Amino acid sequence: MTTNHQVTLALSKGRIFEETVPLLAAAGITPNENPESSRKLIIGTNRPDVRLIIVRATDVPTYVQHGAADLGIAGKDVLVEHGGEGLYQPVDLNIAKCRMMVATPVGFDYEAAVRRGARLRVATKYTKTARLHFAAKGVHVDLIKLYGSMELAPLVGLADVIVDLVSTGGTLKANNLVAVEEIMPISSRLVVNQASMKLKHELIQPIVETFRRAASA
Ligand SMILES: Nc1ncnc2c1ncn2[C@@H]1O[C@H](COP(=O)(O)OP(=O)(O)OP(=O)(O)O)[C@@H](O)[C@H]1O
Ligand SMILES: O=P(O)(O)OC[C@H]1O[C@H](OP(=O)(O)OP(=O)(O)O)[C@H](O)[C@@H]1O
């Protein structure tokens, strides 16, 4: 159980953890175990007042919103889908950078489909983001919720287009797809439970400031 003398930081394994290690180091925080190799979900650190919990990337805002974690690091993609209720987002950490894009099979004329008012089948993990994007453009869509490998959907006739994250473009290229529209740039943000920010201000504020300085260095 966390106390007023300890803060809990929610992180996901993989790219967010890798890119967070230098930020933790700047705040004088060294995990006692490597979450990539450990099966433990609660990981202590060299600082008795800081512990880490390891959760799915999509679940970070939920843990922080409910105060099960005081702080967390989550992608803007995940935060937009979650809605951000109960969270402060004080620092854009400029890590895990990529872009939320609309992509289609090579040869699909997206602009023409939009112009003639076609109804598009859109496969995505990001249904809220996609709904808002296409509604703002006045494009009618049937949303197909997937949990990964969105690039497959247009190749096997499940969808006309996808909404997914693109970084190098390598995954799109390998699957004969092309990005046709940017929805928003994505990076990860530090999120803080609003009640924790007040109740544990003396512990949390220095971490926020250190992350802010490290992120802009
Ligand atoms: N190719 C990429 N390049 C850079 N950043 C990315 C890329 N893909 C995802 N991200 C960012 O990193 C975050 C974590 O991605 P990661 O792949 O670790 O989790 P996930 O598998 O998408 O999530 P979950 O485990 O909840 O299904 C994403 O929310 C996004 O903000
Ligand atoms: O443009 P690229 O550099 O190829 O990156 C894009 C890929 O990265 C993400 O997947 P990720 O690697 O996180 O796999 P996952 O979503 O299946 O975990 C995203 O969903 C794309 O598939």
Image: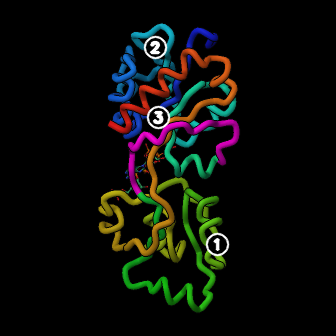
Q: Is residue 72 left or right of residue 46?
A: right
Q: Nearer the viewer, mark 2 or mark 1?
A: 1
Q: Is residue 70 left or right of residue 16?
A: right
Q: Which residue position is annotated with label 1?
A: 136
Q: Residues within 10 Å of mark 2 (few under 14, many from 20)?
A: some
- Earlier residue among tags 2 and 3: 3
Residue at 47% x, 34% y is 12
Residue at 46% x, 43% y is 188
Classify mark 1: helix, strand or loop. helix
Q: Position of residue 100 (x, y in %)?
A: 47, 60
Of residues 146 and 182, the one nearer the viewer is 182
Residue 12 tag number: 3
3 to 122, vertically: above or below: above
Q: Magenta residues?
A: 83-98
Instruction: State if disc 3 and disc 1 touch (CB < 8 Å).
Output: no
Classify mark 2: helix, strand or loop. strand
Q: Position of residue 49 (x, y in %)?
A: 51, 10
Cα gap from disc 2 to disc 1, whole angstroms: 45 Å
Residue at 66% x, 26% y is 67
Distance from mark 1 CB to nearest ligand 1 atom below 8 Å: no
Q: Is residue 95 magenta?
A: yes
Distance from mark 3 CB to nearest ligand 1 atom below 8 Å: yes
Classify mark 3: helix, strand or loop. loop
Q: Amino acid at mark 2?
A: Gly
Q: Which residue position is annotated with label 2?
A: 44
Ligand 2 in which quarter: bottom left
